[in-house]
């Protein structure tokens, strides 16, 4: 037995043994020019639905699917809702949140948001590359930006909203983390400078809101988001699942 291929690719196509899958042009370029893979070399493919599969690339921009390596796994249903921040820190946060297992990334605008247009295609590429690297079998959805008022008005009644409260009045996140993943949940992080009082009042009217504190220090928005995700995953049970790395027959790695 030998380790599975180091190179993983997300594809949109269905996956099953014997199928020929067309690879995206940017993936073909990376395989050839960056990774120096040759026709016949093995890669692992996943699509968020059919698990992970061993495949062999050809010289025409395709991969032929072979052995099934892993069944599709449930990555959970934890959302991250965040006020828009400047692009370099936003992109870093999106990458790390994908690694931490979020199911959806939902940007919002607030009174104190330093608004910047987001490049949806760029953010989607970041989530794809992060999922390929961290061995996720799915991609988080990236929603279009909306106002905080719109988010509050349409918030689903069955989903807990965990507000990272910088006022110092809320109980610590660790005291609620065990309950956070008991059902659908989302973490909400505000902009630099925090939420306006009127916004906190609006959030406070939600029946499923839980305000929590993140310790004695003032954290940047992206730091707060990732710290909260890590605490919830660690104490709420998301990290109780051991990492599973499939093995494939000797000679199948290319």
Image (spheres, grey):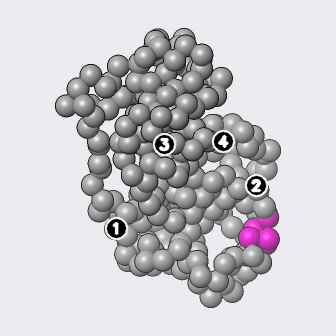
Secondary structure beneath label 4: helix
Q: Magenta includes 189? A: no
* Quarter residue 246 falls in: top left
CA–CA distance in space, label 4 to label 2:
11 Å
Mark 4 near mark 3, Cβ–Cβ under 8 Å? no
Seen at 36% across and 28% down, the residue is 5
Seen at 36% across and 47% down, the residue is 70
Crowd class of label 3 (few under 14; some 14 to 19; many from 20; radius 10 Å): some
Secondary structure beneath label 1: loop
Crowd class of label 1 (few under 14; some 14 to 19; many from 20; radius 10 Å): some
The numbered mark, 4 or 2, whose residue comes first in the sequence reads 4
Q: Is residue 65 above or below residue 168?
A: above
Q: Which residue is mark 1?
A: 237
In-image side of 244 versus 148 (left or right): left
Secondary structure beneath label 2: loop
The numbered mark, 1 or 3, whose residue comes first in the sequence reads 3
Mark 1 near mark 3, Cβ–Cβ under 8 Å? no
User: Which of pointers 1 and 3 indicates the residue nearer the eye?
Assistant: 3
User: Which of pointers 3 and 2 indicates the residue nearer the eye?
Assistant: 3
Residue 149: % across, % down: 79, 72
Q: Which residue is mark 3?
A: 16
Residue 232: % across, % down: 42, 66
Q: Which residue is mark 2?
A: 144
Residue 227 shows in the view: no
Q: Tell me, for residue 123, which label it has, or none.
A: 4
Q: Is residue 48 above or below residue 82?
A: above
Q: Specify the segment rendered in magenta.
A: 147-151
The numbered mark, 1 or 2, whose residue comes first in the sequence reads 2
Residue 145: % across, % down: 76, 56
Seen at 52% across and 35% down, the residue is 19
Residue placed most toward the observer, 152 or 43: 43
């Amino acid at each position: 037995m030998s380790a599975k291929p180091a190179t993983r690719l997300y594809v949109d196509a269905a996956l099953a043994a014997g199928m020929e899958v067309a690879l995206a042009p940017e993936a073909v370029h990376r395989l050839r020019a960056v990774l120096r893979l040759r026709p016949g070399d093995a890669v692992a493919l996943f699509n968020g639905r059919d698990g992970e599969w061993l495949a062999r690339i050809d010289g025409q921009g395709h991969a032929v699917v072979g052995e099934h390596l892993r069944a599709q796994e449930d990555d959970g249903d934890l959302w991250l809702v965040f006020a828009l921040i400047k692009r370099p820190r936003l992109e870093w946060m999106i990458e790390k949140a994908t690694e931490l297992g979020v199911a959806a990334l939902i940007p919002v605008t607030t009174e104190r948001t330093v608004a910047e247009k987001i490049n949806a295609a760029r953010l989607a590429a970041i989530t794809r590359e992060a999922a390929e690297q961290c061995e996720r079998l799915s991609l988080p959805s990236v929603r279009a930006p909306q106002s905080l008022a719109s988010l509050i008005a349409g918030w689903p009644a069955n989903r807990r909203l965990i507000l990272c409260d910088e006022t110092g009045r809320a109980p610590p996140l660790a005291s609620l983390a065990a309950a956070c993943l008991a059902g659908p949940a989302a973490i909400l992080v505000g902009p630099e400078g925090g939420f306006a009082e009127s916004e906190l009042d609006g959030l406070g009217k939600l029946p499923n809101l839980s305000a929590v504190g993140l310790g004695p220090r003032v954290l940047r928005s992206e730091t707060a988001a990732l710290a909260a995700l890590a605490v919830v995953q660690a104490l709420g049970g998301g990290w109780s699942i051991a990492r599973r790395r499939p093995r494939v027959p000797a000679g199948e790695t290319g």
